[in-house]
Each structure stands twice: as C-alpha cells, then as structure tokens.
Image (cartoon, grey):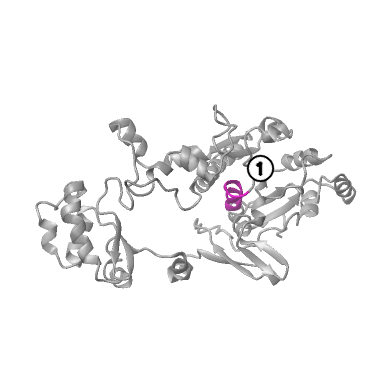
C-alpha cells in the first residue's frame, strides 16, 4: 500500500531525501530523485520560503497564484515548514536525518554548520547519510565562501568567454547552465554515494561546485589550451574544428547541417544532386573539409546552395532520416511536435482550480521502473504533520509544541 511517505514505485522507492535547497540546482537534483521514486521532503524556512515560489509564470485562480517555475522543479515532493533557528527546529531536523538516506542543500559553504546541522554534525547523527552540498565554488578552496549565481559559474568556469560571435563581446549561454550542469553532476554523485552507503553503511559528502561543473562542459577547450596553447574564443554557430557542423539558412528559417564525416558527406552529395562533389580531390576527405580556408571557399557555399531554396519541412523530409539535418525549432514547435509527445517529454499535473500545468517530462526512460514526473509540487508546509508523524514518530502534542515555538508551520 502506498502512502505519502512512500510513493511505492520507481527505482528509488523507499529512499528518503531531505531537500533543504532553494531555487534551481538543488531543487532540480532532488526532483530528479523524486521522479525516480524517492520520497523527497522539501523543508523550507517559514520566515524565508524558497524564493522561487515567487518566480513567473503563474497558475492563477482569482487572487490565488502558484509558480509554474517552482512547480516544475519541485514536483512530487512533500512540504514541511521548519525554522532551524527556533527552539526545537534543529532537533527536529536531526530526528528526520536519523531516518533519511540523503540530504540536499545548496547554501553558501558554512551556512549549515552555523545552524548546527553541517555535515560533520549530521554524519554523527546518521553515519550512512549521503550529504549533497551544491555551491558556487565548492566546499574547499580559497574561493569557497564567495556568493555565486549561474552567471558566476558561466564567467568563472570559462564558458562565457567562449560563447557568442567573433569580434563581438562574449554572450552568456541562454539557459542557467551553471545550475543545470551542477544538478546533473550532483545526481550522478548522489546515486554513486547511495550505492556505497547501501553496500557498506558508510555515507559521505557529495561536494559539487557550479564552476567545476561548467568547466567540465567546455569540451576540448582545456586540452586545446594545455596541449597547443590555444584559448577558445567565440565562434558563433560554428564548431571549433568540425566542419560542416553549423546553422544554415533555408527558405523559411534555419536548419542544423552536420554531415561532416566522409560517409555522411558522400550521402549528402547524392541526396542533393551533386554526386561528383564527393570525389572532388579538394574536398573529398574529412580532414580537407575541416581546413578553415577550404571550408569557407568550397564547402560552405555548396551546402548553402543545397539548403537555401528548400523549406525546413522539405529538407527534413528529404534528408532527415539519412544525415544529421534538423530544423531550428522554437519552444512552441518543440512542445507541439508529435515526437515530443511520443517520448512523454511534456507532462501534465492537475492543480485543481488553478488549472493544469504542462511542463517538461523526465528524459531518463527506465523500462522496468519508469519515472513518474506528472505530479504536482507541494504547497508550502503542506505535509508537515504527516511527515513528522510518519517519519520522525512525533505525536500531536509534540507537533503542537513545535508550532507554539514558531519552529513548525
């Protein structure tokens, strides 16, 4: 029988996660675990709830509103309002930690320790606890106490300097890649640490920095610098050295064309009616086509001629099943694409009078234990009583005392 404390499905069924994090990197990591079956308990300070509850867009019903942003990154969680600075707050968290498997936080290093619930304390409470700390610069090093946002990571991790167009100021990546990359590395680290804890009974600290995570996404930039002394600079829509592999204009927009290998290049020449180009001694091998001067003079004009008079649909119909040729789509086109629905990548959660929220689904597809992303997010402190009774073993009198001190909402 399933209960609010055990969804009863998914690979992580029975795993209990305490989510003390805010905004994006931490909440999204915990949400991934919830989608995969873990019982995730969102713990918020009643005096300072997760600020993302105020982020647009909003589901509305009269004067009532609920953040779609918050909902997308906190779906499937239980909500507890707990003030760690109020009498009984820290003790209550420690009781929850005794019965938890994972704790996720993304405060500036040292914040949890000041509250008396840092890793060194909580590992004594529960030696098998996997303590996940996501921060801007990590838990160690001379920069660890610096505040950080996503743009901090893009700047300090080198990605910002690489993005944009030549001879123009660099451009930030258009999504919060510093947060999102930290999320994904945190989930990988969490699952690795959880496996170790289940096998040995030994928990550990999972330390993930946004800056480290961004640096790990810079592809060949590090080895280009350490091997050749070449610093990556903005290259627009071109790859640093793979050609052709970029955006091209077509009759009604743009497409990505990436047929750079010899096999794909030959197939392209056949598809677009230029079979002799495949054997042209100046452009007949990948290494020759990679040469910037040859590419600009011979290859790019040829590909442009193939594409410019055809529509996106025509090009995908002609070549999409043979070579990497894909229309550059708007988000609206992606959401409405039948292929998106086929992969369950837009899911719905029912918020009653507020309406139905459509949001992105779960990209991890498990054949035996499928994820459950189509769930609503918690309202603030929605499950405080159920969690404290069911997980910490508190009775109604203990809960009432916590509310009287202001520790619990």
Q: Residue furthest top?
A: 142
Residue at 42% over, 48% down: 171
- Residue 386 shows in this picture: yes
Quadrant in the rendering for residue 220: top left
Q: Quadrant of the N terminus?
A: bottom right
The residue at which mark 1 appears reads as 101
- Residue 265 placement, left or right of 152: left
Q: Residues within 10 Å of mark 1 (few under 14, many from 20)?
A: many
Above or below 131: residue 378: below
- Residue 142 placement, left or right of 305: right
- Residue 325 shows in this picture: no
Residue at 19% over, 59% down: 301
**Range covered by the magenta-colored residues:** 23-33
Residue at 60% over, 52% down: 31
Residue 30: in magenta span: yes
Secondary structure beneath dot 1 equals loop
Front residue of this view, candidates 310 and 124? 310
Rendered location of residue 236, percent (x, y): 33, 51
Rendered location of residue 374, percent (x, y): 60, 63
- Residue 213 placement, left or right of 162: right
Residue at 60% over, 62% down: 57
Front residue of this view, candidates 164 and 132? 164
């Amino acid at each position: 029988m399933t209960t609010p404390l055990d969804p009863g499905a998914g690979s992580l069924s029975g795993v209990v996660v305490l989510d003390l994090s805010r905004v994006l990197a931490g909440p999204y990591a915990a949400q991934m675990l919830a989608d995969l079956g873990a019982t995730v308990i969102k713990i918020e300070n009643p005096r300072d709830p997760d600020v993302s509850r105020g982020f647009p867009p909003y589901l509305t019903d009269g004067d009532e509103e609920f953040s779609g942003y918050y909902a997308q990154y906190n779906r499937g969680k239980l909500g507890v309002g707990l003030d760690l600075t109020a009498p009984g707050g820290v003790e209550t968290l420690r009781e929850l930690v005794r019965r938890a498997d994972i704790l996720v936080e993304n405060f500036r290093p040292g914040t949890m320790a000041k509250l008396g619930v840092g890793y060194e304390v909580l590992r004594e409470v529960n030696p098998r606890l996997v303590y996940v700390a996501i921060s801007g610069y990590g838990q160690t090093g001379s920069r660890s106490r610096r505040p950080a946002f996503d743009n901090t990571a893009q700047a300090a991790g080198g990605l910002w300097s690489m993005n944009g167009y030549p001879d123009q100021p660099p451009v930030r990546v258009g999504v919060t890649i510093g947060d999102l990359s930290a999320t994904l590395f945190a989930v990988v680290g969490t699952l690795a640490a959880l496996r170790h804890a289940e096998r040995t009974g030994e928990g550990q600290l999972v330390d993930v920095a946004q800056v480290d995570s961004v640096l790990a996404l810079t592809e060949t930039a590090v080895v280009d610098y350490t091997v050749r002394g070449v610093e990556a600079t903005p290259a627009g829509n071109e790859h640093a050295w793979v050609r052709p592999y970029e955006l091209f204009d077509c009759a009604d927009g743009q497409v990505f064309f990436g047929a750079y290998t010899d096999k794909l290049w030959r197939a392209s020449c056949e598809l677009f009616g230029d079979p002799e180009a495949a054997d042209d001694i100046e452009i007949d091998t990948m290494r020759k086509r990679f040469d910037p001067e040859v590419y600009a003079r011979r290859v790019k004009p040829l590909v442009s001629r193939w594409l410019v008079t055809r529509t996106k649909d025509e090009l995908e119909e002609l070549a999409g099943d043979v070579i990497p040729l894909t229309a550059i789509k708007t988000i609206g086109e992606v959401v409405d694409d039948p292929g998106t629905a086929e992969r369950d990548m837009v899911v719905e959660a029912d918020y009653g009078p507020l309406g139905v929220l459509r949001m992105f689904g779960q990209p991890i597809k498990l054949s035996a234990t499928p994820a459950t992303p189509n769930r609503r997010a918690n309202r603030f402190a929605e499950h405080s009583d159920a969690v404290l009774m069911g997980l910490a073993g508190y009775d109604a009198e203990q809960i009432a005392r916590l509310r009287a001190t202001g520790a619990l909402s």
